[in-house]
Amino acid sequence: MFDLKFIRDNPEAFDKALARRGEEARSADIIRMDAEHRAVLTEAQEAQARRNEASKLIGRAKGQGLEDEAQALMAEVGELKQKLAALEEKERALGEELTGILMTLPNAIYDDVPDGESEDDNVEVRTWGTPRSFNFDAREHFDLGEALGGMDFERAARLSGSRFVILKGSIARLERALGQFMIDLHIREHGYTEMWTPALVREAALLGTGQLPKFGDDAFTTNTDHWLIPTSEVTLTNVHAGEILDEADLPIRMTAHSQCFRAEAGAAGRDTRGMIRQHQFEKVEMVSVTTPEQSDEELERMTACAEEVLKQLELPYRLVKLCTGDIGFGARRTYDLEVWLPGQGKFREISSCSTCGDFQARRMKMRCRPKGEKQTRFVHTLNGSGLAVGRTLVAVMENYQQADGSIRVPDVLKPYMGGIEVIEANT
């Protein structure tokens, strides 16, 4: 969320930031509404001060036997009480309207983010690995999984509808192995603290990370006023919501392996077969809370942690910097990792690592304080997939497939697979 003082002091810069996002200029309307809100607040404060003063004068007038003056003061207090109630209601309504507008505005992106309209305009930063060559036609993961008896989309659809899957046997174990491998890597080698957080949250948590109010259609809600998390970024980032942290304790690095739920409201007709785009999926998430000075370096570190997962799995990938037309609502800079899928013959996103600056921290009122100082400031938050487990399963299946339809188990996953080195039909 934007700082109102910044908008008042830098209206042109604010509108320029929105323009890079494809948004219309809003500074004039916001500044006008802010001025009206502050004027009502000032009027209410003045009315309250006069009411307090008049209340004191009533006792003095009565003590001096000035009944007419006391009655007039009492009448004034009564009028001021009604006026205050009206002013407070107006101030509340204006404040909510102003906050509501600010909550729908996307974060300002960094100057080095490339301009563009879609994912086609993202800029490749580097690649790693060489796509495997097969002496047979590479198959997509759903064909492999169904032939092996380890993926059942038909029965899942009978249970839950489209965009769900039932995994079975060694394929189910392979997905579990991937999640365990990722979380172990991040806590043992990358210094993240493992967390286990709820899958159901209150509205305030989604407001804090920016999924609400703008993207409510992409989330699932319940009849108990809870929301299912679209990613554990929501819970991990909100762990310290409303707190003042000691700067000496930063950065805080957290990771979680969680179930995630997305309505995919804007994905009609896209990836309708297979596991690329599901309503329910698993992800290992990384979240960092830093000082403003640490956040740029932390993004590079976090991205390298996600890359290491792919390197150890020996999956070819490329790193791209997202352009203005593809970057997420709350991000200031984002790197996507795209893994090579031989069955599709192209790279597909498997991780996004973003720095949000103080955008989320302002929404959830999370600050830090240097040791020995009274002044606080907003922290910076970052998040990244390390990785999307289902999509990694897809990548492993397609990259490690063999001519007979079996799948070799990557070396780093063998300790998690109970001695299984090759996944064959009905294993």
Image (cartoon, rainbow, N blue to C red):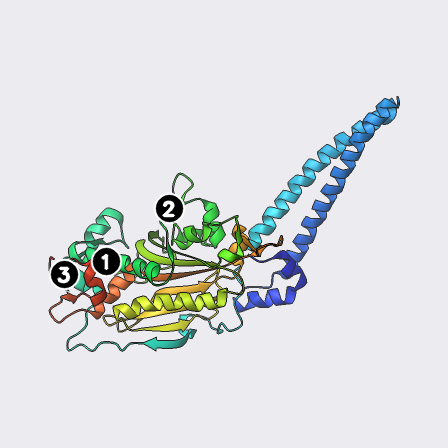
- The answer for how far apart the CA atoms under marks 1 and 3 are is 11 Å
What's under tag 1, amino acid-wise?
A: Ala
Under tag 1, what secondary structure? helix
What's under tag 3, amino acid-wise?
A: Ile
Nearer to us: label 3 or label 2: 3
Under tag 2, what secondary structure? loop
**Image quadrant containing the N terminus:** bottom right
Under tag 3, what secondary structure? loop
User: Would you name the residue on which mark 3 appears?
Assistant: 420
Q: Where is residue 78 in the image (x, y as percent from the top left)?
A: 75, 30
One can see residue 268 in this view? no
CB under 8 Å between callouts 3 and 2? no
**Disc nearer the start of the sequence (3/2):** 2
The answer to which quarter of the image holds residue 422 is bottom left
Q: Position of residue 44 (x, y in %)?
A: 72, 41
Q: Residue at x 27, y 50 (%)?
A: 161
Q: Which residue is drawn at 48% across and 74% down?
A: 114
Q: Where is residue 258 in the image (x, y as percent from the top left)?
A: 33, 52
Mark 1 surroundings: few (<14), some (14-19) or many (≥20) residues within 10 A: many
CB under 8 Å between callouts 1 and 2? no
One can see residue 50 in this view? yes
Residue 177, labelled with which disc? 1
Residue 198, labelled with which disc? 2
Q: Horizontally, is 310 left or right of 359 in the view?
A: left
Q: Outermost residue toward the front?
A: 372
Q: Horizontally, is 289 left or right of 130 in the view?
A: right
CB under 8 Å between callouts 1 and 3? no
Q: Is residue 183 above or below residue 139?
A: above
- The answer for how far apart the CA atoms under marks 1 and 2 are is 22 Å
Q: Position of residue 109 (x, y in %)?
A: 52, 67
173 vs 79, nearest the viewer: 173
Mark 3 surroundings: few (<14), some (14-19) or many (≥20) residues within 10 A: some
